[in-house]
Amino acid sequence: MRGAPPCPGNAGRGTGSREWGTGTEDLGQESRGVGPPVPGVACPPPLSPRRSRSGKMMQNVRLAPENEEDDLYSGYNDYNPMFDTEDLENDAAFQQAARTSHGRRPPVTAKIPGTSSSSPLATGFGPKATLSSSMGRPMTGGIQDGVSRPMTAVQAAGYTKAAVRGSSFDSLGRVRGPAPPLEKKNSDSPEERMRQLEKKVNELVEESCIANSCGDLKLALEKAKEAGRQERELLRQREQIAPPENINLDLTFSVLLNLASQYDANEMYSEALTTYEVIVKNKMFTNGGILKVNMGNIYFKQRNYSKAIKFYRMALDQITSAHKQMRIKIMENIGVAFIKTGQYVDAISSFEDIMSISPNLKAGFNLILSYFAIGDGEQMKNAFKKLIAVPVEVDCDDKYISLNDDLHKNLLLEAIKNDSISQMERERKSMAEEYIMTAAKLIAPVIETSFAVGYDWCVNVVKASQYVELANDLEINKATTYLRQQNFNQALETLKMLVKKDSRVKSAAATNLSCLYYLGNDLEQATDYADLAVNSDRHNPAALTNKGLAYKKLNRIGEALDFFLKFHAILPNSAQVLFQIASIYEIMEDPNQAIEWLLRLISVVPTDPHVLSKLGKLYDNEGDKSQAFHYYYESYRYFPSNIEVIEWLGAYYIDTQFCEKAIEYFERAALILPTQVKWQLMVASCYRRSGNYQKALEKYKVIHRKFPENVECLRFLVRLCTDMGLKEVQEYETKLKKVEKLKEIREQRVKSGRDDSARNRREGSDDSSGTKGERLTAKLKALPGTNEPYESSSSKEIDASYVDPLGPQAERPRTAARKRAEEDDFADEELGEDLLPE
């Protein structure tokens, strides 16, 4: 078969030579490459035979062009209308194929001229005819019994093995309908119930913590208890269906810990300790031993320091060295507990260990206190040096100062100047300075032979440390300590030395000097140092105050007012400044301005009784009694012990003819000053003016028992008894005579004593002493016995006149008298018949 001519059916596989097969010349141009077989010649099988679903052989053969020159790339630019997709909407065949099954579309048959449809050369090309490729694999699928053939070996979307003939391709799965709903969890299953219960326990614990952080401790405890009950129910249910190893220990631990913490927060210490013991004694909680610190804190709050130390040490034994900071804090607690029990040596041991491992400010300060308690001066010095050497870990403030005009950098510096980190740094630095200043003031008097030497040692140590600026503050404290010791000369010396230095404390030292000279009434020096303080710091309010007070005392009222107004601009809500401005306006006799500034002051301090009484006094001077009463009453309400206010209110009610209300205020004054008879006499006079003579008489009798020699009380008793016709009038008249006589003798004795003293100064004291003794003896002999009734040798009548302490009574209107006079006049005339009643 090697020398046989090629089969016509393989035409187009060669190079396009015209010697391939016979009869190809008779084919038309459109069907070139397909010809009948040559009879009698055996042809080898085609290279890529394919059969259609109907079983007929189909070949797609394309012969080379007739020209002798081969064109391998011919036909690529030919337009095939099958690839025109722009007009598919108007293609009826395509729309029909899209709406119906591919198998129902009528096939398109290609025929060769001169053959019939039943000829073996006739090949049907449907919409998905099989085309032979160079590798012998079909490119598309044919149609067989209406079942769609997959395009590849992998099943594509929309095709199934059981596809019905005529079914359309559903790429979106619309024919199958919506997806089935998710399978619902069975809420009645034990696992689901436990899961929901565990979720509820966690929510209760979270709500308890939130309530605690908001300050509602009672609600936090209730939520914690409820979480404990739910967690026990969860454990009971879990034990019924699961082995013990499936228990959620973390949930149990968190519930118990939260419950103990809430008991502690509500000061239910016994319940908290019991709950902590449940956690600590349970070996399943591996980290429960650390909670002994909390138990130690509770014992510390209960002042059971021995047990607190015991639990702190047990917790310290169970914490590894990896938790360094936690161990340090527990050791600090142990040291503080030792200080509380007075075991200063053990406390020193604890704090020394801390300062050797990880020094901090609190431990260093407590170490100084412990050495101070045992009186070890040298160790106090060493501890002070250790405190000074503790690193503060705070950057200098110079980093916030801009050195150029970079706008972006300046904005950044302004933003970080007051952020949370900067505030934390300032707080830490302030705390360090407070510890150092307190420690220096504490140890300075005991570490050296004198206070001054000890303070100088502290100042020198501070100057050599990182707290150089703190040395001047120590000098200021040194001066104030001198003032407490009333050593004014040393205080002045120290302050004058600081004024000469150009430091931040220069203004403070000058302010203190100005205050000292002001108190010493050296107003010139006070003004000079106040000026110096203001020049050093023009916003120093204390310096402005001193200068204003000095000018006020020098009667330079205008300048004093200017300084206080400047001070008011700096501190607009300063109560002291507002009061000084009002006081200056009062001195300047401008009551309206004084009242205005006092009203501003009332808006700042609305409950100050002194300011309220001051306002009442100003309104009273202006004649506004209603406003005066309002502010006096408000002052009395906030401070009911001011005698001036009480007296004004009582007098106000007397003036307005409400004596019953005035009694309340005078009784209050009598309680405040029980040794002064004035207020009790006013109470009795109020009873008498209100017409309650019996109550007035009883009150006068009480006053007479307390003050038997009070002449005014006896005169009132004589007058009342006389008016009421009582028999006691004779008794009170006799007592009044005796008291008046004793009063007269005392006055004469005082007068003679003055004359004798004057005579002694002129003549000597020897003769006058004898004369004075003889005269006094004669007068004493002339007095009647104590048991005998007093009888006057003269016929002098008793003076029962008195002066009402409330002043003269207001005259009653005389309308009734005028009426009687009119009636009398009218009665003298005869009534005519026209005036008689009908």
Image (cartoon, rainbow, N blue to C red):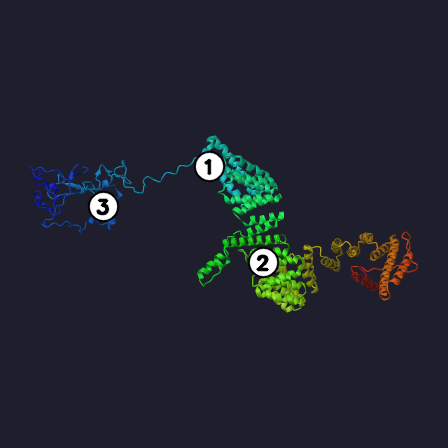
Dot 3 alpha-carbon crowd within 10 angstroms: few under 14, some 14 to 19, many 20 or more:
few
Work out whether residue 98 or residue 834 is closer to the camera in this orientation and state it: 98
Quadrant in the picture for residue 615: bottom right
Is residue 538 something one can see in this rendering?
Answer: no
Q: Which residue is mark 3?
A: 93
> Quick one: label 1 or label 2, which is nearer the N terminus?
1
Q: Quadrant of the C terminus?
A: bottom right
Could you say where residue 596 lies in the image, as x and y percent from the top left? 63, 64
Q: Secondary structure at mark 1?
A: helix
Is residue 21 something one can see in this rendering?
Answer: yes
Q: Nearer the viewer, mark 1 or mark 3?
A: 1
Report how far apart the C-alphas of labels 1 and 2 lie in the structure.
65 Å
Quadrant in the picture for residue 733: bottom right
Work out whether residue 367 or residue 521 is closer to the camera in this orientation and state it: 367
Q: Which residue is mark 1?
A: 195
Q: Which mark is residue 473?
A: 2
Query: Taking 88 as reference, is 497 left or right?
Result: right
Q: Secondary structure at mark 2?
A: helix
Instruction: Residue at the far left: name it.
Output: 40
> Quick one: label 1 or label 3, which is nearer the N terminus?
3
Report how far apart the C-alphas of labels 3 and 2 lie in the structure.
104 Å
